[in-house]
Image: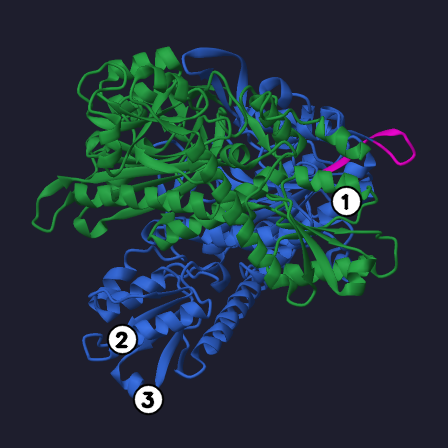
Chain colours: A blue, B green
Amino acid sequence: MANKEEFVTQIASRATDFPQWYTDVIMKTDMVDYSDVRGCMVIKPYGYGVWELIQQQMDARFKATGHKNAYFPLFIPESLLMKEAEHVEGFAPEVAWVTMGGTEQLTERLAIRPTSETVIGAMYSRWIQSYRDLPMLLNQWCNVVRWEKSTRPFLRTSEFLWQEGHTAHATGEEAEEETMRMLEVYREFAQNVLAIPVIVGKKSDKEKFAGAVATYTMEAMMQDGKALQMGTSHYLGQNFAKGYDIKYLSREGRLEYCHTTSWGTSTRMIGGIIMVHGDDRGLMLPPRVAPTQLVILPIAQHKEGVLDKARELKRLLAEAGVRVELDDSDNSAGWKFNEWEMKGVPVRLEVGPKDIEKNQVVLVRRDSHEKLFVPMEGLADAVKALLDRVHEGMLARALALREEKTVNAVDFEQLKAGVNGGFVRAMWCGERACEEEIKAKTGASTRCMPLERDKELEHKLGCACVHCGKPAKTMMYFAKAY
Amino acid sequence: MANKEEFVTQIASRATDFPQWYTDVIMKTDMVDYSDVRGCMVIKPYGYGVWELIQQQMDARFKATGHKNAYFPLFIPESLLMKEAEHVEGFAPEVAWVTMGGTEQLTERLAIRPTSETVIGAMYSRWIQSYRDLPMLLNQWCNVVRWEKSTRPFLRTSEFLWQEGHTAHATGEEAEEETMRMLEVYREFAQNVLAIPVIVGKKSDKEKFAGAVATYTMEAMMQDGKALQMGTSHYLGQNFAKGYDIKYLSREGRLEYCHTTSWGTSTRMIGGIIMVHGDDRGLMLPPRVAPTQLVILPIAQHKEGVLDKARELKRLLAEAGVRVELDDSDNSAGWKFNEWEMKGVPVRLEVGPKDIEKNQVVLVRRDSHEKLFVPMEGLADAVKALLDRVHEGMLARALALREEKTVNAVDFEQLKAGVNGGFVRAMWCGERACEEEIKAKTGASTRCMPLERDKELEHKLGCACVHCGKPAKTMMYFAKAY
């Protein structure tokens, strides 16, 4: 028990200091480390293992929806970046610039890509000639750089890893369909892989992507009640097609501008996983992205037959496709319990002499601490079913917390109180000035407008803007955000 | 036939103009495109598909040898890069420098990583405390930048994609073992996945990696007789450990410097695949990295039942794990034959009304043009076996060509003649000045010294340096190189 107490004091409690808890967890579980470059993180093997599982499962979804991967240059010539006015204005302040190659001063500065609409747009302009070349459905996995003033590992860093989808279509309707299709891919992925329930909706004009006609988002609630934007899907209309001259010859023989989309998610999702699921003991990883899904802890491992049985179980589970580790180190059982709990491994398997006698093992769930005695026979299937139940349990808990911390506000006082630790649903006038005042007064921003109107709810919320009292145009989610 | 001739004239012949043939092939098969940034390429979906298959199969080998992936920053502060003197000297001339972040001038320039020994060394110095932390076995998949004067897609570009392994060990012996283990992983991969026979050996001091104690390489012969360095594995001794302060407390309680290694392969391998296997009809992709392994061409596809059967075969082969495409476009059969041959798809499947009647299909090998009539029953197994035979056939052909174009030289005239279109084995004094004179006179560089001495061959080659006549120290492969 001494070990356990010593251990627990290493991590701040969520209730007392959530930011410190986050830092403690990511550092002590070897997810990430700070580097010598301001705002850049090192993703350590345990954190990168989560990213690899995210990549695999998301990439399979992209391919199933007809997308292929490609790779575009890291560098964007300044003149190329400048061709879409709104886009430049949005990104220029946070661009890192290369000015020298070797000892030679470059004649034109090169931006390190903050996102690749511009460089991909320039290529699409060459590749797309006729309607037969459409739709063009590409995705890229890469690093991007945004020179951020204040950074936090996974959540906001100067360099991060992400995927960016870029598509071009013959009609606006098809491009809008694509935008919504990928938003749904993201939502389904968040729910079914990350065990994170998300609210999907449309961003306000102020919050939309620089250069987009419309930005759609998935927003998740962290345990401190703040929002994290987990992914966005943009309908770009013909803005980039005009800026980068992406035209096609239609079936009718007319030269038309394409309609384009882009959509992205990043290593930021790992920050979301940590802040949605973790507890005061440390990480709690959703089974489908946990690098280790089950850890075997042999009890009284010096006794004859225990380690042999543990190794046999490891082989059996690995062959069945479970990501399994065996901890046969000479640390105490108590130390191991704490360590692997902190690491967030979804299921712990204990096996000792008594279990072997009874031909059973003990499985302990990380999420509920529930203890199960399970026969050796059929173990792999039992473990897989349990991992699914852990996933469902984590998702349900996160959803319940979000519902508990989401309130309806009919006046500004309710909004102010509500965003102090949660999401607020309220009616809003749609004016940017009003949005900025709300932000200044409460620290909360508009998160998104629901995709479908809920007339019953709107009726409850009234028809006046929660802040300025003018006629409301839409329901809006407000929250403080990362 | 008109189609076919038209087609063939699009690609230069290898014999007449090998560089132009290379450019024609990579452009016409949609492997790659030039970008607006000098020396940077766009890897198009077909080329990137090859890279994805390389990554998957190489990554599995890294994991099987105990390595984990991680991610380190793109940026290296100038002062950090400068800590290992030889390394700086080697890489400084080709570094791209970031000097501005947003509108602010940086106080210290940031190098875009040309390779990551320095930034990883700095982290290892923090992470490694005692012998218990060793060995440290990490790999990174990422982009790197080297500001090259003259570039060619895949072979030499300012930005490229690669993997870089970085390991730290308690003893020099262990580090040397690791260096050789990864060289062998590379060799086996080249042979069994890329169907490329490689010569492995040690680089001369002049050609070794900046900062290494020893560099080992795998060298492949292109069809024009020139060498391509396809991957390198470096034993770094304690050079980087001393530069970056990577120390551990030994079992005996002494503070010691680690011994480190690094090893890398890149998208350059794709250039090797093209130049080893391609022919005047276009690409010839090794089955294990071909994005499409088999293409189904329905014959007389307008006839009843043909397309249905083609679709059924596609489903059947895909389910069996074959990467299969069905070309049911309305292009002529001749056009399709040429197109998919140019794309280098290893096996073509033809199915028409007569075949359906006979319950068979026609399989045509891309490498030998051999035509096989194969029963529908057991087709998937037959296709898989055929893909293996295509692999073996391609490997054997490449090996035969290399042997044909490799000669022994006992005097300088023989060396000069031999490097004009092939590899030369000769005895060498080991002096850098001599090496530089050979390069100046013949355009050929030292490629590698064999790992094991072949005394019989050495006896044939004599005991004097092929160029200067001084006593020879070693056998050396000489060749012109990409």
A250 inside magenta stretch? yes
Q: CA distance from mark 3 to mark 2?
A: 16 Å
Tag nearer the camera, 1 or 2: 2
The residue tagged 1 is A176
Residue A104 lies in quadrant: top left
A267 vs A8, nearest the viewer:
A267
- Marks 3 and 2, the one that precedes in the sequence: 2
Tags 3 and 2 both on a single chain: yes
Q: Circle 3 — which element?
A: helix
Q: Are marks 1 and 3 in contact (CB under 8 Å)?
A: no
- Marks 1 and 3, the one that precedes in the sequence: 1
Tag nearer the camera, 3 or 2: 2
Where is residue B474 shown, x and y percent of the image? Answer: 22, 28
Q: For the N terminus of chain A, which image quadrant?
A: bottom left
Q: Chain of mark 1?
A: A
Label at residue A308: 2
Where is residue B294 shown, x and y percent of the image? Answer: 65, 51
Q: Chain of mark 3?
A: A
B17 vs B425, nearest the viewer:
B425
Q: Circle 2 — which element?
A: helix
Residue A108 lies in quadrant: top right
What stretch of residues is rendered in magenta? Answer: A249-260
Where is residue A335 shown, x and y percent of the image? Answer: 25, 65
A377 vs B129, nearest the viewer:
A377
Residue A293 lies in quadrant: bottom left
Q: Name which residue lies at 49% across and 72% down.
A: A384
Q: CA distance from mark 1 to mark 2?
A: 58 Å
Q: CA distance from mark 1 to mark 3?
A: 60 Å
Among all residues in the image, which is located at the extreme right?
Answer: A252
Q: What amino acid is found at the position of numbered circle 2 in the picture? A: Asp
Give the crowd class for mark 3: few <14, some 14-19, many >=20 residues within 10 Å: few
Label at residue A358: 3
